[in-house]
Amino acid sequence: MADNTPLNALGRQAAYQLADITKTRPQFGALTPRWLTRLLEFKGLSAGIYRVNRVVEGDTPLDALCSQDPGKQKIPQGYVEYQHKPREYELSSLATIINVDTNITDVYSSPYDQTGEQLALAVESLRERQESQIINNDEYGLLKNAAESQRIKPRDGAPTPDDLDELLTKVWKEPSFFLAHPKAVAAFGRECTRRGVPPATANIAGGTFIVWRGVPLIPTDKLFVDGLKNPKGTGGKTNILLVRTGEQKRGVVGLYQTGLPGEQNRGLAVRLRGVDDKGIASYLLSLYCSVAVLADDALGVLEDVEVGEYYEYK
């Protein structure tokens, strides 16, 4: 029979009152590694405007004489023409306001500073929105600014090695990385497995990625599947980007404002707006960003990729 005699010792509930509790900082489940903004090269602006001066394209910029004795032939003359109305990119603003009760921060800021944690989560949220805007913004986003000549369709719905090879022909001058939703990365992996050509992996910037032809496939949930970051079903359509980044490479360049009052990090400022008569402190967070495509062949898009193809293996 069970012994129901009560223990002659301190119980758990009473002991709990004297115990220290180890706590975490607030955990924000929507945060991602934001690989795009970590791998994209950025350019700081002093006046918030970035003009992309392009040379008028031709087969060659100038005619030239190829001869061992140039004195016997006339050397061609000419000049390199520039665009008369180059495109200018203006920084867009992302902003939010955080309110903090000073009575709360005075009393409940150990071991974690309540104001600091609130601002840190707000900054992370703005950075998530920045990455989404770089891809999806109607004015400067990568999806809307890829040239028509740089857009292709998959051969058979799912993203195959042949499709990524075709995309590489569009961005063949020093491509930096593919960008795809995790479901698209998985779909490409399945197609490689089906064909017996499993892709290699590489460690880049602290992460491990699938690599195709030496170019990593970088995952991001900002390339939506059927318009959703987290689609419920197994299928759906999305896009895969191929990017060359860097100003020196005539690639894709992220833009931000420098010298902001209250600047915390790249292009982001935090300002105290004041404390009202109820003790509520208000902080304004502002983030200025944009992205420029310096040359058409710096960006390619594989459109309408199906992510729901699965196979049975024997």
Image: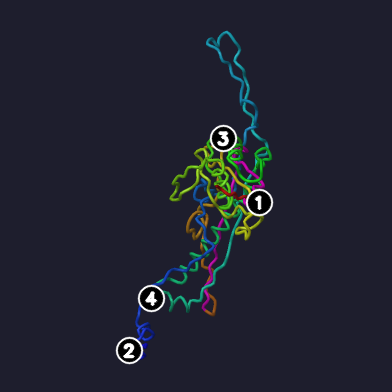
Q: CA distance from mark 4 to mark 1?
A: 46 Å
Tag 4: residue type?
A: Ile
Placement of the N terminus among the 4 image quadrants? bottom left
Image vertical order of residue 109 relative to residue 171, above or below: below
Q: CA distance from mark 1 to mark 3?
A: 25 Å
Residue in front for this viewpoint, 62 or 15: 15
Image vertical order of residue 10 relative to residue 287, above or below: below
- Secondary structure of the residue carrying tag 4 is loop
| Residue count near mark 3 (Cα–Cα under 10 Å), binned few <14, some 14–19, many ≥20 | some
Q: Earlier in the sequence, mark 4 or mark 1?
A: 4
**Residue 21, numbered label:** 4
**Residue 263, numbered label:** none
Q: CA distance from mark 2 to mark 4?
A: 25 Å
Image vertical order of residue 99 relative to residue 163, above or below: below
**Residue 237, numbered label:** 1
| Residue count near mark 4 (Cα–Cα under 10 Å), binned few <14, some 14–19, many ≥20 | few
Q: CA distance from mark 4 to mark 3?
A: 55 Å
Tag 1 and tag 2, C-beta contact below 8 Å: no
Q: Earlier in the sequence, mark 2 or mark 4?
A: 2
Tag 3: residue type?
A: Trp
Tag 1: residue type?
A: Lys
| Residue count near mark 2 (Cα–Cα under 10 Å), binned few <14, some 14–19, many ≥20 | few
Residues shaded magenta: 279-308
| Residue 167 horizontal/vertical position (percent) | 60, 39
Q: Earlier in the sequence, mark 1 or mark 3?
A: 3
Left or right placement of residue 102 versus residue 76 in this view: left
**Residue 7, numbered label:** 2
Tag 2 and tag 3, C-beta contact below 8 Å: no
**Residue 172, numbered label:** 3
Q: In the picture, residue 95 is in which quadrant?
A: bottom right
1 or 2: mark nearer the eye: 2
